[in-house]
Image (cartoon, helix red, strand yellow):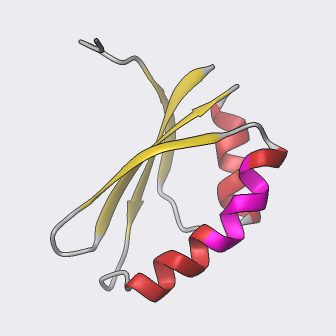
Amino acid sequence: MLHIIVERNFATPLTDAELKATEARMMPCLDLYRVRWIRSYWSADRRRMICEYEAPDAASVKSVQREAEAAFDRVWSAEVLGEP
């Protein structure tokens, strides 16, 4: 499995309700494409988010995002440095 990064930018700050709705839409898609969410980082102003997933490939993560109607700007494969 690969580490896949998703970058997101929002014109207006994302609300907790919007985030929860997106997560609910995403849950069935994650299993379908064998994608596992690892962690997310959210900027203090709630206009940017970086999410890390484990998946067979970047295309699987893109499919999850599209089917869940989750906004995203970029999806790319990453190498983890300094992991214990």
Q: Tell me the chief SS of the magenta region.
A: helix
Q: Looking at the image, is 84 positioned above or below residue 16?
A: above
Residue 26 is one of the magenta-drawn residues: yes
Q: Residue 22, image x and y in percent?
A: 59, 73
Q: Residue 35, image x and y in percent?
A: 68, 39
Q: Is residue 18 left or right of residue 44?
A: right
Residue 69 is one of the magenta-drawn residues: no
Q: Which residue appears at 40% of the width and 17% of the height?
A: 79
Q: Is residue 18 left or right of residue 43?
A: right
Looking at the rendered structure, the number of numbered marks drawn on it comes to 0
Residue 67, quarter of the rendered image: bottom right
Quadrant for the C terminus in the image: top left
| Residue 34 vs residue 67, the one in the foreground | 34
Q: Residue 69, image x and y in percent?
A: 67, 71
Quadrant for the N terminus in the image: top right
Q: Which residue appears at 37% of the width and 81% of the height?
A: 14
The segment highlighted magenta reads 24-30
Q: Is residue 69 visible to the viewer in this orientation of the structure? A: no
Q: Is residue 72 visible to the viewer in this orientation of the structure? A: yes
